[in-house]
Image: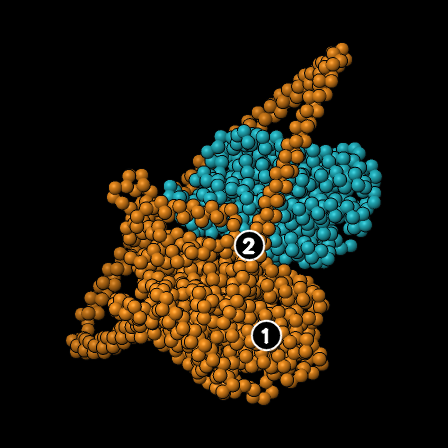
Chain colours: A orange, B cyan
Amino acid sequence: MNRSHPEDNESQLMGNRAKLKAGRSQLVWGLQLANVLPRASLALYGAGVLVSLHLMLKHHELALFIPGVLQYGLSFKLNSLSCLFILVASTAWFLAGLFSLPYMERSHAATHGTHGDTIPSRFSRREVKQTHIATHETHGDATATLRTSEGPRPLPNMTRPTSGYTHSSNHALFYVAFALSFLFTACVFASGDYLTLFLFFELLSLSSYLLVRYEGTPEAERAGILYLYMSLAGGLLLLGGIVLISWYAGSFEFWALHSLPDAAKLTALVLLSAGFGVKAGLPGLNAWLPEAHPVAPSPASAVLSSVMIKVGAYGIIQTFSIAGEFPWRKEAFLVLAFLGVCNIWWGGVRALREDNLKRILAFSSVSQMGYILVAVGAAGAFSYSPHAGMVSAAGVLGAAGEEASSTGSAGFALAMSGALYHIAGHSLFKACLFLVAGAALLSRASTSLKDLSGVARSSPWISLGTITATLAVTGFPGLAGFASKTLIHEALLEAVHELPAGFSMAVLLEKGFLWGSYLTALYFGRVLIHLYGFNEWSNKRATSGKLAKSDRHGAPAVFAVVFSAYFLLLLLTGVSPGHVLNLVVTPAAAALGGSFHKEIPVHFFSPETLAPVATGYVIAGGVLLVSRRMRDISGHATTGTLPEFYRSTLPRIGARLVYWLFRVNVLATQIYCFFTMAAWQIVLCFGELEELTRTAWAGSSHATLVFVHLAYQGDSLDAHTFSHLKHAFFRASFAMGQLDAGEERLLSSAEKVSGRLTNWIAREETSFEESLERGARSARYVPLAAENIDDALSSEVQIAVRGAGSFIESASKLVQAARPQAVQDWLDQTTTRAVVRASRVLIWFTLGIVAFAAGALLVLR
Amino acid sequence: MDRTSLPAVLTCAASFFPVIAVVFFRRLNPHRRARAAVAVAAVTLVLIATGGILARGRVSILSLPMEMPPLGMSFAADPLGLYFGLIVAGVWLLVSIYSLSYFEHDERAGRFLSAAMLSFAGTLGVAFAGDMFTLFLFFELMSLAAYVLIIHDQTQEAVAAGFKYLLMTIGGSLGIFFGLIATFQASGTLSFYPGHLGASAGGLVAFAGYLIGFGIKAGLFPLHIWLPDAHPVAPSPASALLSGLMIKTGAFGLIRVFWHFYGREYLASTGWVAVLLVLSAITIFLGSAVAILQEDIKRRLAYSSVAQIGYVLLGVALLNERALTGALFHIFGHALMKSALFMSAGTVIHETGKRKVADYSGMGKIMPRTMASFSVAALSMVGIPPLVGFISKWHLAWGALDASMPWAVVLLLISSFMNGIYYLPIVIQAWFGQSSGDLAPVKEKASLWVPVAVCAIVIFAVGLVFQNAPLAFARVAAHALTGE
């Protein structure tokens, strides 16, 4: 890393050598870590999968309390809900971790190869407007100018300046942050009270920040700082809610929320859902999401987008299901559902306009989080009571809990099952899509859709992953997304029935949900067209064929494992939704408080459920075909934005709708900017205030000076008085001087006395020191004597050892002489046989190990 | 002298011991003087700890025989004083170890060390004073000796800042003096025990005097002007002591006045405490907001101190047990965090001469141990959970809710966010930023990084260990004051 130019001057060389020397031990440590860590962490994720699966299928519940930590102790609880989330997390981490092994090795060769420039240009299109913090802005600029001033591309063996910071090539930091993020995520899901949850929530923010900014480009830095600040703010909102709850209830338990007075409960709910909402990407709080997810390395984007935003969803689900009854409950839930629909539309429309694959996927995550929020909101339409096991621990819930209507409970369970199912499904297909994007990035060194045309045809495994995940996210029957969307839709329909007449608006929600899901099919259809190169078939068929061929420099074997694993998992979770529900999802929803008293009232794969999906595909396909034909006719080579098409062909209402959505989005951004600016103005205001106090202080001291001056002036007017005063003053000072002199004389005599005292002490001290020295001199004889004794002893011992040696020698000679030849032969034979047998065993053993290692390596690479 | 006054004798001895030590400092060269300072701090710590063990939560009083009529001189060993005294001696020990190498090539080190010993005695005396007059005397000793610490470098800014400090300190002393005269005239006593003078504590004049006097020392909003000037110009050990310990004496004095003289009922009935409440709220917001704009690391830390002392004063002004516990614990936490931050900033200045925040880019690779401790302390300032900053904020927030003032919680959260804005970029740039290239990795001297690392470890451990002794102690001290 620290190799230097030969033409560097001497001093720099010395400096570099010193750096090298200091860095060597770190390097060795880092290398070992980098070899062991990825595999060890894979074992950790695998263990997470196995343990959570085991606990979930056996319906075990575990609880652990560590007293004293953070003053109140940490509490962990594992029930079927947290096990489901941990299972989802560990699966995503395991597969992404597997993927990261070849990815992290190759990504830097790819990104810093010939195509190195294409990525930043794509990402830097959008400015981060929200945080104009002076310090970090200057930092960003400083690094940027530093980088541009480096001039032409440097030699590959130098410290890489293209990356903002010099992480070594072994990516130890990445793997550490990756593993830590997993641990903290799992701990958030496993935490049994708010304090524990908050602790790991904050730690998760910090560790995932490391992942976001890992690439170190200016975009990554900016996105990272935005992410850090927003999650810090979210954590503090969460803390506010937790302080409120724990102060009212005197406890950190989750159920404490249930027993709060109404106003406090509502405030706490708003605070908590805003805090979790930053992670979950609620509208208005998701500014970081489309920035941060694309800039992270692809395996990290996969877990960020598939699991870490679910931490927020988990918190919101947990909070709202515990809250129980409170005034405006139905309104609050409706607001949540409305926010969900907003998310679906906003994410979908933005994804349609984007050109960068990873940004499309990030916006799609925003959109998919909307489904989960709609499900949670729909759950609120049913009257239900929190699960007895959750609340009865405190004795909060009495007979009222038993009287919950069975239909309400079932409806609640339906909606919550839909949310949980969608969480599990989304974590699978979104991770898979991000890994596809990663694989595409490896082969094309770009994530722009234009550059990616035909990339999916470069390898059958990537193609498999692309097709499966895209079909799943658009809700193809038989894959994971279909079942969950159907469940949510059913729950929404039932909720519309359940709600009283005043909530006629809920019907609109249902329509918004349905049409929003058609949008998903539309933008993923666009992605598919690009990834398979259909967009270039009409005019550039020859070139695209060439491009596809050039990609075939081999996808790593791990890709085959990962993408076929995703294919199997998506199929497994989607082909028989009833079994998945009964085994995994319903117990988790039951832990939240809902329960089915009979079979699930949904028939998957019936005409009613299949019809919307088919409609969606038909509409999306039609729109895409028409838009392609329009483009062919008008001769536009560029793909992507569709506004002209919308204005010309689709009915004007549709165009208006999209237009107004854009307007609303712009307005929201403006409001956001306004608030940021206002906050900044307040900070500046306080700076002004500070300046003002400072000036006031300076002014007052100046005024004092002026006053003294004036007083002096006034005084000098009356010279006579002044001279009198002066005389008096002189006389007084003379007297003071006299006094002073007397005092001084007194002092000097005292000093003399003390000097004499000091001298005496010094003399005493010297004599003491002398005696000490004498003592030391005599003491010096002691070690000498000891040394003599030691010498004598050692020579004695030496003689004894020599004697013993000669004795043993002669004894062994005696024994050899005494041993008969027959015995000797027999001994020789048996030993030879034993050695032969042992060596045979050893050889087989070694061969076995080698074979095993070779197999393992083959599988891993 | 009976057995019950033995702890007070020990604390009295601890307060005078550094002064006596200074007399013998004359005979040592600066190098030995630095070592002797470490020894003195260690011995004092042992004395106070012994006193604390012997006191066992009871209050023990020692009135010195040489009375200055009509105001006596007395020492007390009560939970509050012992708590503060232990913090002072502990942090002082760490800072004096740090000073060993910091002043290695400084020919004026001798003067600094003597003055530091004097202000050590002053700070301890403030902690252990049994009456207001004794407290005043030691407060003066501390303030005046600290002037020498501030002007140590004798640059133009240092002398200017020192002059400002001196003027304001003298003004503050006058305020305290007026206050104690008024109290004495109204009640005829200045002793903290039995205390609880209520209405006869001297009324509004005394209250204003105390508020101004102690407020200047603590850095309360309009009176904090000296603080951001004086702390950055002082040498870093002095900044650590000033920011970590000495400004706490202002809050400590206010606690003494509020709970021993006035009492909760009287303060609540008059409503004077609202002044402190509003001013400390402004202090918190202003300190955090202005710190964001600072480019000089030590100035940023100094403004952060303004904000943090605002937390303590807010806890004092909320007038309930939980808030007081939070304030006392924050005295402990902030003493550790801020002295760690100032010491590590000092190490960076000492080794590389970099003072600007922008220059911290890549510093983590140049001096990893120092910057690791810096990062822990900075994260603790932001209030990341397993660290002490979180615990004190937690108690302050609960105390604010106890006093039914939820806006204070909002204020604390906003301030935490701003702390994040001005601390996290330093940490991030230090570890991930590109270093400016002209710096080779520095060989960190053990005596420079070990004290900082000890601070960081304590910051981390106190949140994690099963028995949080400092918090328990703070709770005992707060309970002794509030619970009758």
Relative height, residue B366 to residue B166 (above, below) = below
Please identify the quarter of the rendering in which residue A100 is found.
bottom left
Q: Is residue B11 left or right of residue A304?
A: right
In percent of the image, x 75 and y 40: which residue is there?
B208
Q: Is residue A717 left or right of residue B441?
A: right
What is the spatial separation of the Cα atoms under label 1 and label 2, in whole angstroms?
Answer: 30 Å
Residue type indicated by callout 1:
Leu
Q: Is residue B204 left or right of residue A632?
A: right
- Tell which subunit mark 2 falls on: A
Where in the figure is residue B311, as x and y percent of width and height?
A: 65, 49
Where in the figure is residue A733, as x and y percent of width and height?
A: 71, 16
Is residue A388 visible to the viewer in this orientation of the structure?
Answer: no
Residue placed under numbered mark 2 in the picture: A673
Residue placed under numbered mark 1 in the picture: A508
Please identify the quarter of the rendering in which residue A236 is found.
bottom right
Where in the figure is residue B407, as x and y percent of width and height?
A: 68, 55
Decide which of A740, A107 is in the foreground and name it. Answer: A107
In primary-sequence order, the first of circles 1 and 2 is 1
Where in the figure is residue A268, as x and y percent of width and height?
A: 65, 65
Residue at the bottom extreme?
Answer: A598
